């Protein structure tokens, strides 16, 4: 099986990606948190810094673009070509209300004529490979056959399917019947994304879809950073391994970010997921959330590692 690391805004930036790869590996490609160009195709300085080749030299990164403006998409794609990238990913899956209201991300799925014009333009103008990450519709899975037929008209390098509709957000079960339609009807390679939190989940998926070679993991990897390696037969993550990863990540954030507050913000976001690795994390997670200094944060984390054991992965909920 091949494994992709899904982008999670605010967490999976280049510092996290490089540190994760050094400590856990097993990831074939990382996808950047989406780049949101303005009308002229301009990017914010933080977005540019995150996808600079020198900041991603040890990993295979696929930059992701979120826009409904074909000209802006083309400008960013050209810039990424100059950086040496050979593929970009179009985000048609983001369910955020503010994104959808602007007819971007999963919001564009409900605008079939507009989506078709957009795809016509980007595929006719861009020389770079374009993959697509999509949901199966905005409001109903019944929208997906028409979307798949539309995607099949273009040289999409890969279709990454999260089989929920936009209005599901991350509720309800992923619709494997809809995903089966993609497996059976897509003209391009298909990758699965959605609710793979344990090795059992991955093996169950592989048994159901034996021809699918790639899965994208997101919350599952944040909840259990060793998941992909473990699915390939490596030993489960132990506390020493996890502690080393945590400390390296904390140190690098301190080197790059300005001020304790920014470092704490980054680390606290990660603990929303990471705390579920431990048997009884509640009181420690509360201390981590309330920490206002790095010293207080460090003390809470040290206590958690010293006093709690890691859970069996079958109890992970993501």
Image (spheres, helix red, strand yellow):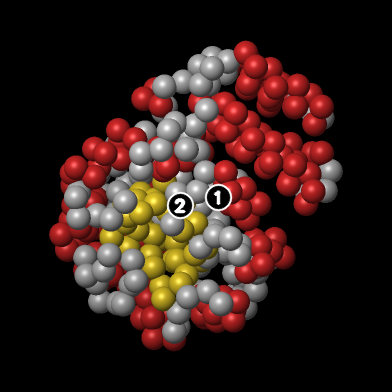
Q: Earlier in the sequence, mark 1 or mark 2?
A: 1
Q: Position of residue 20 (x, y in %)?
A: 57, 46
Quadrant in the picture for the C terminus: top left
Vertical placement of residue 251 versus 312, above or below? below
Depicted 221 relative to depicted 87: above or below: above
**Quarter of the figure with residue 154:** bottom left
Q: Is residue 99 left or right of residue 3?
A: right
Which residue carries the number 2 mark? Answer: 27
Q: Are marks 1 and 2 in contact (CB under 8 Å)?
A: yes
Residue located 39% across and 68% down the image: 131
Q: Nearer the viewer, residue 114 or 82?
A: 82
Q: Nearer the viewer, residue 142 or 235?
A: 235
Describe the element under mark 1 as helix, strand or loop. Answer: helix
Whether residue 249 sits left or right of residue 156 in the image: it is: right
Q: Which mark is residue 21?
A: 1
- In the figure, is residue 1 to the left or right of 261? left
Query: Does 215 sit above or below residue 271?
Result: below
Query: Neighbour class for label 2 at 10 Å: few (<14), some, many (≥20)?
Result: some
Residue at x 53%, y 74% (from the top left corner): 85
């Amino acid at each position: 099986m091949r494994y992709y690391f899904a982008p999670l805004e605010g967490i999976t930036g280049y510092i996290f990606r490089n540190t994760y790869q050094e400590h856990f590996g097993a990831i074939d490609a990382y996808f950047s948190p989406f780049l949101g160009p303005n009308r002229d195709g301009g990017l914010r300085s933080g977005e540019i810094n995150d996808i600079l080749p020198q900041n991603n030299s040890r990993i295979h990164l696929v930059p992701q673009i979120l826009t409904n403006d074909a000209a802006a998409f083309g400008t960013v794609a050209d810039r990424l070509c100059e950086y040496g990238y050979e593929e970009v990913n179009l985000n048609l899956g983001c369910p955020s209300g503010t994104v959808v209201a602007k007819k971007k991300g999963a919001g564009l799925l409900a605008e079939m004529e507009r989506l078709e014009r957009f795809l016509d333009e980007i595929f006719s103008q861009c020389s770079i490979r374009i993959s697509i990450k999509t949901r199966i519709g905005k409001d109903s899975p019944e929208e997906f056959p028409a979307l798949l037929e539309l995607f099949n008209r273009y040289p999409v390098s890969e279709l990454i399917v999260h089989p929920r509709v936009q209005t599901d957000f991350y509720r309800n079960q992923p619709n494997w019947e809809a995903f089966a339609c993609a497996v059976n009807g897509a003209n391009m390679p298909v990758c699965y994304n959605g609710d793979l939190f344990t090795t059992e989940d991955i093996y169950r998926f592989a048994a159901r879809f034996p021809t699918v070679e790639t899965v994208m993991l997101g919350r599952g990897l944040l909840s259990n950073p060793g998941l992909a390696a473990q699915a390939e037969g490596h030993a489960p993550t132990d506390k020493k391994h996890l502690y080393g990863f945590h400390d390296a990540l904390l140190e690098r954030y301190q080197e790059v970010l300005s001020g304790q507050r920014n470092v704490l913000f980054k680390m606290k976001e990660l603990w929303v997921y990471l705390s579920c690795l431990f048997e009884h994390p509640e009181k420690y997670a509360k201390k981590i959330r309330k920490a206002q200094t790095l010293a207080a944060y460090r003390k809470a984390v040290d206590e958690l590692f010293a006093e709690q054991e890691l859970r069996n992965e079958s109890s992970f909920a993501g």
